[in-house]
Amino acid sequence: MKLAPITLFAYKRLWHTRATVEALQKNVLAKECELIVFSDGPRTNADKADVLSVREYLKTVTGFKNVSVTERGKNLGLAQSIIAGVSEVVNQYGRIIVLEDDLLSSPFFLKFMNEGLEYYKDEDKVISINGYLFPVIARLPETFFLKGADCWGWATWKRGWDLFEPDGEKLLGDMRKRHLKKEFDFNGAYPYTKMLEDQTRGKNNSWAIRWYASAFLNDKLTLYPGRSLTKNIGTDASGTHCVKTDLYESQISLNPIEITDIPIEENRSAREEFGRFMKEVQPGLGVRVKSMATNFFKA
């Protein structure tokens, strides 16, 4: 099996970065995988010391086939850092596993990502493999598909990332022209369209809402695990545009996810369960919704 490089995006949070790397080091396949890190430059003079401390730590990281660190000379911001880094790596390797510096992973995260990439490498309908699962109540299938793409521990191929459209105006115009707003918003359960509108107005710079919209408009599917393989530890108000919340906290599976032959179509029951979860945690369109949206598809 061809193993994809792990691409990690880091900035100035030493504790979070260390926790993310240490969880990865415990993964099955970690020693056989390359780790490529992009360290963004400081946004302000006040950030320099924290960025430097992260970079000093990254120089000590072992436990992988190879570790390389690109230290950006200037601050790109999370969105541009990810867009540029993913493009660079996927164009070189053909496939990629992506993590930010605030994601703990199951010991079987890399196994699921790589097996999913290999299993669906020739299936054009599938755009990505996802590691995170909402803390829904219902028991979901071992694996299932949903339309679109996600952002908390994921993987794709060059053919998938080639569909990424960075122009939010173009995406929004296509969404409106095709009357897809309701479906895009999980039948009104979550304000994804507003997030995309805000991106076009400069109110956020989310790469993830554009990734989701790009996949959605191309009618592509993402493979999900029935148990979460990642946990976000950045919803503690320490990250870019994040506020403190435990609404998304999922228990990480300590057992592997088995990839088997399933219909390559959206799982309607899983979609309904996602919509139900979204509605339950955000009963109105007030501050709480804004906080959730900011956290989930952060810039």
Image: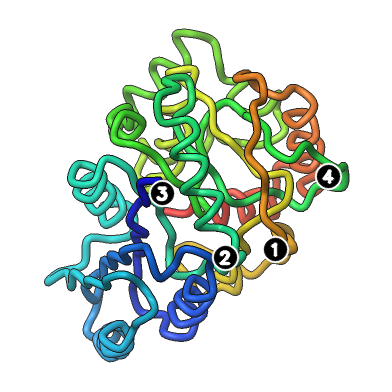
Label placed on residue 252: 1
Q: Label 4 to label 2, Cα distance in Å?
A: 26 Å
Measured as percent of width and height from the top left, residue 35 is found at 32, 66
> Mark 2 falls on what kind of element?
strand
- Give the residue at mark 3: 204
Kind of residue at disc 1? Ile
Label placed on residue 280: 4
Kind of residue at disc 3? Asn
Q: Is 173 displayed left or right of 58 in the figure? A: right
Of marks 1 and 4, which one's residue comes earlier in the chain?
Answer: 1
Label placed on residue 105: 2
Q: Is 1 displayed left or right of 83 in the figure? A: right
Q: Is 246 displayed left or right of 114 in the figure? A: right
Kind of residue at disc 4? Glu
Q: What residue lies at 67% left-to-right and 25% top-to-bottom?
A: 262
Between circles 2 and 3, the one closer to the viewer is 2
